[in-house]
Amino acid sequence: MQIIPSCENPDPPEISRRLGAVQAEMARQGLDFYLSHDPSNIYYLTNFKNFVHERPFILLVPASGAPTLLCPKLEETHVRSRAVGELQLLTYFEFPAPKGQMWSDRLNEVLKPSHRVGIESLCPLAVFKAVPGTAVQTDIVDTVREIKSAYEIGRLAYASRWLSRGHARLLAAARPGASTLALNSQIGGALVGELLADNPRANVLACEAIAVATPPAFSHDPHLVPDLSCELVEGGPHVTLLCGTANGYGAEVERTFFIGHVPEAAVRPFHAMLEARALGFELTVPGADMAEVDRRVNDLLKARGYGDNRLHRTGHSFGVTRHEAPFLAEGYAHEIKPGMLFSIEPGIYLPGIGGFRFSDTVLVTETGNLSLTHAPETLQALTLQVEA
């Protein structure tokens, strides 16, 4: 398949396609409106992204026609400068506000007691309680986001290639004494600069790159943020994390690596992790069940003696965030379909030894899958030589 990497903003037909998919599902569910409060879903349907504070932003999608964004007057020009596609604005002056001038008063100008309104599962209680009519919990936009368009695949391919370059630089700079903070500042900052050079119109609020390598004293805890002055050491396992959003689309690439030599205690879990990863790639194909993929990967790790050293599922998806549904996870019985993306990242975590994890951003194709990220994959290639 031909993939054209891009970091350009969506055009109106792409936004219209997304809106049409949402409204088609609304019709099947008999909804008059769909209410979205999730900033990622609002971004997906409008191209507007902002740091949301206490002032609510609420997108109201009608059964037909253009959506309405309820937002603070403060942000009106900001919305107009970023939004793509037809969008009506409904503003309120401030929050808090006197009775009759609240955001909820303006909400009631659109929604009526007779309406059947779809509301996202994670909608704040204050917004949920302000909705008149019949509220129906449903996550239509999240579901529509699961299968990517050709445009989105190009965006994700760009983000993956961008982070893969950063990962190569991280490994090249890895040496005993290098600090996590220095590596992240050097490589993450450069990546964002390159992105903005590629697309000066990119939304800086939707651009971020994290380039981290954690030494063995911390790598057994995948979400621990250690003292950033911690330093890489000879041996390992060190675990890398290159993740970010490139003008609003996320990806990641991760590897376990060693400097100078591989401790004897690290050899067996490293190869067990590679075996689990290979099985994950083999199973993540169209028609497979997401829960079954994770179950079989977990069964393999249990059979190798690492059942108690797992801390997470096999994978998650990417899109307008770098961590979203659908999931390769036991208990999540959903069919894998072409156009979906997943991380494939079974991990083994051994306190006192370290962490063992690869992760890639993987596209499900019509016939199998394709990794959009690229990094070394063998123990030999990931054993870095110490300079004399």
Image (spheres, rainbow, N blue to C red):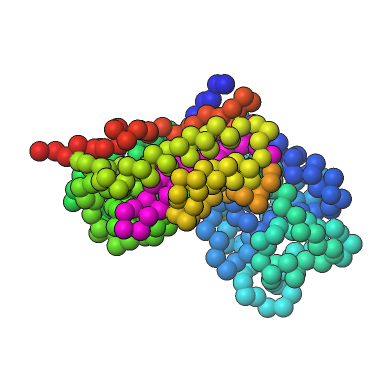
Look at the image and say whether residue 350 sits in the magenta stretch.
Answer: yes
- Nearer to the camera, 54 or 77: 54
Judged from this view, the residue extending furthest toward the left is 388
Instruction: Determine the residue positioned at 34% across, 53% down.
Output: 354
The location of residue 168, given as percent across then percent down, is 32, 36
Judged from this view, the residue extending furthest toward the bottom is 98
Judged from this view, the residue extending furthest toward the top is 1
Look at the image and say whether residue 162 sits in the magenta stretch.
Answer: no
Highlighted range, magenta: 335-359
The location of residue 307, given as percent across then percent down, is 49, 52
> Where the C terminus falls, by quadrant?
top left
Question: Does the image show residue 40?
Answer: yes
> Where the N terminus falls, by quadrant?
top right
- Nearer to the camera, 249 or 297: 297
Instruction: Determine the residue positioned at 75% across, 70% down.
Output: 129
Task: Left or right? Give the position of 160 relative to 227.
Answer: right
Judged from this view, the residue extending furthest toward the right is 114
Instruction: Determine the residue positioned at 70% across, 36% down.
Output: 17
The location of residue 376, given as percent across then percent down, is 35, 33
Instruction: Determine the residue positioned at 63% across, 64% down.
Output: 56
Question: Does the image show residue 184?
Answer: no
Q: Quadrant of residue 172?
A: top left
The location of residue 166, given as percent across then percent down, is 35, 39
Task: Left or right? Give the position of 159 relative to 210.
Answer: right
- How many numbered circles are shown? 0
